[in-house]
Amino acid sequence: MKAVLLSLLAPVTCLCAQQKHVWVLPEINAPRMQRMLFDSKAAGEPVSCYVFTPESYDTQKEQRFPVLYWLHGSGGSSPGSAAQVAQRYGEAMRAGKIPPMIMVFPNGLPMGMWCDWKDGSVKLETMFIEELIPHIDQRFRTQAKREGRIIEGFSMGGYGAARLGFKYPQLFAAVSLLGAGPLQPDFNEAPRAGPRGRDQVLGTVYGGDMAYYRAQSPWLIAEQNVEKLRSGLLIRQIIGDRDETLGFNREFKRHLDALKIPHTYRQLPGIPHNPNLVLDALGEDNWGFYKQALVGMRSAQPE
């Protein structure tokens, strides 16, 4: 967490320079995991992600598998953090607690915010929606339809999961927000980044334009797509009660309630802003979400 805070407080010039050199992540050495690279027109260079395949991917050659897109928080993706999440979910797959899934850990840059930047220098949303998802469907035996995709993320990744899942509900069966932020309609405060960090992100990503920030926000996207989000999309929101973003998460829950968008909300007692502690606190209750999202898709075959 300290490293994340330091990255938030770095000068804007350093942040921009850093962003331009991290499209290719380090190699990963973890069971069932690989680094995948693909040529991205949106980035103008190769982009990488980490991919986990379940053991049955090798043994059941005719089967197609659902995909869980797991979006990282601020500070960027790392082999260690991706491997920890994949190990946890892989054990659940082997124990039959969730269906076997392919897991994709995209590269959202240290502070990319999972959206296209106003100045056009970074096109994360375009890369993810128009390039990464089609590439994964082409490269792996996926269930290449909305019923076979889940999008989930922690912190900045939860913000990304919400904005992308709500904006493109035709692509995903379920959206999971873990300790998500920023969820507030206006970026006047940033509880974890502080005023200086907020100014840097607002300037770098959103061009200092609050209207552009609002246009990217899950708050506004939920309003714009309210009819589509009222049916057919499984949504959950999880937040620890010691998380600095708790207040804004509560406001976002009330916003979804006012819009009559069905979702589940759970507040975890004693849990701070930490993905492993969130998943530990959910425990066995975590797995029901994925089973519910993937009902009827466990052994789907290509059409």
Image (cartoon, helix red, strand yellow):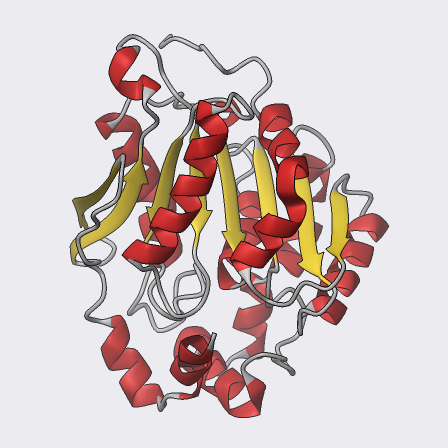
Write the residue at 43% across / 60% down. Answer: 115
Front residue of 124/251: it is 251
Residue 207, placed above or below residue 220:
below
Write the residue at 31% across / 50% down. Answer: 127
Front residue of 300/216: it is 300
Write the residue at 46% across / 37% down. Answer: 89
Whole-percent x and y of residue 272?
A: 64, 67
Whole-percent x and y of residue 180?
A: 60, 60
Write the residue at 20% across / 43% down. Answer: 36
Question: How many numbered markers are drawn?
Answer: 0
Task: Report which quarter residue 22 is drawn in.
Answer: bottom left
Do we see residue 224 in this rendering? no
Whole-percent x and y of residue 303?
A: 38, 8
Task: Report which quarter residue 284 is drawn in.
Answer: top right
Do we see residue 76 in this rendering? yes
Whole-percent x and y of residue 123?
A: 33, 60
- The answer to whether residue 218 is left or right of residue 9 is right
